[in-house]
Structure formats: structure tokens, C-alpha cells
Amino acid sequence: MTDYNLYRGSIFHCIEDGGNVEPVYFPDGLMVVSKGRIVEVGEYSELSAKFSSEKSIVHFKDSLIMPGFIDSHIHYPQYKVISSYGTSLLEWLNKYTFVEEQKFSDIDYATKVAELFLDELLINGTTTAMTFCTSHKQSVDVFYDAAEKRNLRMIAGKVMMDRNAPDELCDDIESSYADSKSLIEKWHNKGRLSYAVTPRFAPTSTEGQLIQAAKLLKEYPNTKSAKGVLLQTHLNENSDEIDWVKELYPQSKNYFDVYDNLGLSGTNSVFGHCIHNSTDEYKRMAETNSKVALCPTSNLFLGSGLFALDELEQHGINVALASDVGGGDSFSMFDVMNQAYKICRLNDYNLDPVKAFYLTTLAAAKVLNMSDCLGNFESNKEADFIVLDLNATELLAQRLKTAKNINDLLFCLMTLGDDRLVSKVYIFGQCAYQK
Ligand SMILES: [Zn+2]
């Protein structure tokens, strides 16, 4: 006999219908979960009879059940770099980030931060993330250990960095390849874990190192039976960075061409930021089916610039939203959506609330090649979901009294919401966090 768990409440998720993003909303819904996977979602009035013989229903009153957030670009070692004052990207890296990342040579320190980081993700309703580690191999091992204990679906990678950083953080061409390869062999596709090849960005890698990164992508491609490794790095975040790349790679047509020319573009590659892309770069990213993680809170915090979501979409590039902690000043994807909305307003168009939630759930799953198992409540997907308390704050409760429809409700959540709303987090069908 199948063992079902039943959850009643308002339910929301996004589906794609012929390329269009559609919200699915059940004001009084029922979600059926079995063995960590979604069986069915629907109206309570229709579904409840079918499962009436099952054990008692968990009823979340005045709550919204939705898929867990997916953060497609974040740095777990920057947990304590968050909220560092007064600099733009390159100075921020030297003054704060490279100082903190050196502490991860201490395995106990790295372990402690990995646990704190995963706690903070869950508190904010983020159930999957793709994170940079440091250049220390053990910084990846301790992260995967911590994620595996919690049965989280996580993606991580050792930073490859062989120049323009403190000696203590620099690897070299051979060791970065060998360490990455042994981590892939140990962790990639182990349970719910996957690996991302992680050159930090073009300024801190020699061409030789980027060639080795591309070699790893080729050695672990997507096959019928297994997913290949991903690639995560940064692109066109800051104007000084772009000028620097021109100096370091004078033969390249543009910044994206550095990666593209060396074999690092493609469907498994996720480029953070892409604020200052040229038209040629948008076109080439689309041609290679490369993916983008947009980081609005980070871009505003560091003063990096305003991304052009409309241009990315016009070029048909797959995009997701991301926190980029610690350049980003918040773990909350509500805050990320809120700032994304404002960046679009400054560019004189609107970010539709359904689209915003899509970009932090199903679209993010697509960017990470995980839409077969994550991102919404289609049957047989993994039951990573969150329960939002719609009365978490008095202001939200009062404002929602006049919300007319799901779009209005979602817009209130993304502008007024934060971690106070997240009352429960379920990981593979098990409650992993309760406020
Ligand atoms: Zn980043």
C-alpha cells in the first residue's frame, strides 16, 4: 500500500504551456506527496475524495504552499562577507572577500560556515542553490558533507584561480584540474548532489587554466543516463572588470568571447550578472544556449549597474534570479525579486510577479538543468516545498485583504515579504525547517 502525505492550503506554482509561463493557483488546494515526490496537486474539493482513506491531512490555514526557491548563483564562503561597506567589485574582492576566503584552509572553520550557510538558506525558503566554494579542495568536501546530511539538492564547485589573487588562494593549472576532477568523481550525481566547474572569472584564471576547465566539461557531458557537470562563473559585472579583461585577453572580441573561444559556453554553463553585455555577446550567448543568473541585490549593493532582462529575453536566453551573497546583501529571494522589479522599473518596464516567481523556481531549475526534478509541482518531481504564512506580519495581512487575484498576492509577497513568512520548509517530503 502506498503511503501518502496530504497537505491542504492555498497552492501556487508555475507551469510552461507552449513556451508561455502560466501560474497555477488553487485557493483551497491539496497536495499529495509520496516517498519524497509529488503525486498530484489540485482543488481540495476535487482531490480529497480520491484520497479520503488516507491518514489525516495537514492543513496550513492562511498559508501559501509553493515550490522551494532556487538560488542559481551564490558564494557560501562569503556568508560573513555580507554587508561589507563602501567598495565596488574589484576593491571589494581584495579588501573583504579574498581575506575571508583564506580562512577556509581551516577545515573546522569551513565546516562551521557551511552549516550556518545551509541553515540560512532554509530559513529563507531556498531549497536548492548553486554555490561557489573557495580554491581549497576541502571547502567543497565539507559543503557536500553538510548538504548530504540534510538530503539537499545542491550544486557546488572548487574555485579555480591561478593569478591576480593572494598566493594563499591561488592554485595552478595542474592542481586545479586534478582537484576538480577528483571532486567530480567523488560527488557529482551522488544522491542529490552535482558539481559545477568553477573558474572564478577570466581575470583570475590564465588561459591555460580556462582550457583545463573546458576539458572537464568535455569529460563529463550530458548523456542519456547521467547529467554532465555544470559551469559557473562571472561575466560583464563591472566596467573596471571589463576593461581589465580587455587588457588580459587582448585577442578576444569581447568578454564572453574569452570563455566561448576556449570551450566554456554552452547549455551547461551559467554566467553570473551579464549586466554590460554587447549585442554580439547576447547573440552569441543565445546561439550557444548559455544560461544567465541575474543578481539584482548584488548589482545594486556594489553599484555594478542595471541588467537588461528585456534584452536577454528578446534574445531567447534562459535566465534565472540569484542572490549572489555576499555581494548580494540578502539571502531572501523575496528581496531578490523586489530589487529585480525596481531595476526593471528604472529601465522603464515591469517585471510581472508571476514571472518573478518563475525566475526563482521553474526558470532557475531550467538554468541548472534540473527542471526534470525541480521547479514546480508536476507529478513525480521532488517534493521540495515551502509554506508561507500570509499573516506573518500585520502589514502583509492587512494589505492582502485587498489583493484581488494571484498576481496581486504574489506582488505583495515579493515586495513586503522576507524570512518571517517562511513557516515551514520540506525537503524531499520531510519537514527540514519549522519556524
Ligand atoms: Zn558571484
Image (cartoon, rainbow, N blue to C red):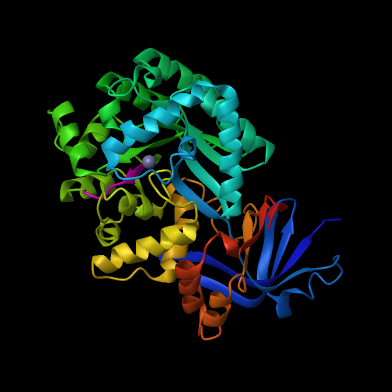
Q: Position of residue 361 (x, y in %)?
A: 50, 57
The quadrant in which the N terminus is found is bottom right
Answer yes or no: is residue 187 visible.
Answer: no
Q: Residue at x 27, y 62 (%)?
A: 310
Residue bounds of the magenta highlight: 270-276
Q: Is residue 362 above or below residue 120?
A: below
Q: Quadrant of ligand 1?
A: top left
Residue at position x 41%, y 39% in the image: 268
Give whichever of 1, 6 is nearer the camera.
6
Q: Give me the residue at 45% from left, 16% from top.
A: 178
Residue 329 in the image, given as x and y percentages of width and height: 42, 50
Q: Is residue 343 visible?
A: yes
User: Would you identify the image quadrant in which residue 231 lies?
Assistant: top left
* Left or right: residue 135 compared with residue 389: left
Q: Residue 27 at what x, y percent from top left?
A: 62, 78
In the rendered image, the quadrant that contains the C terminus is: bottom right
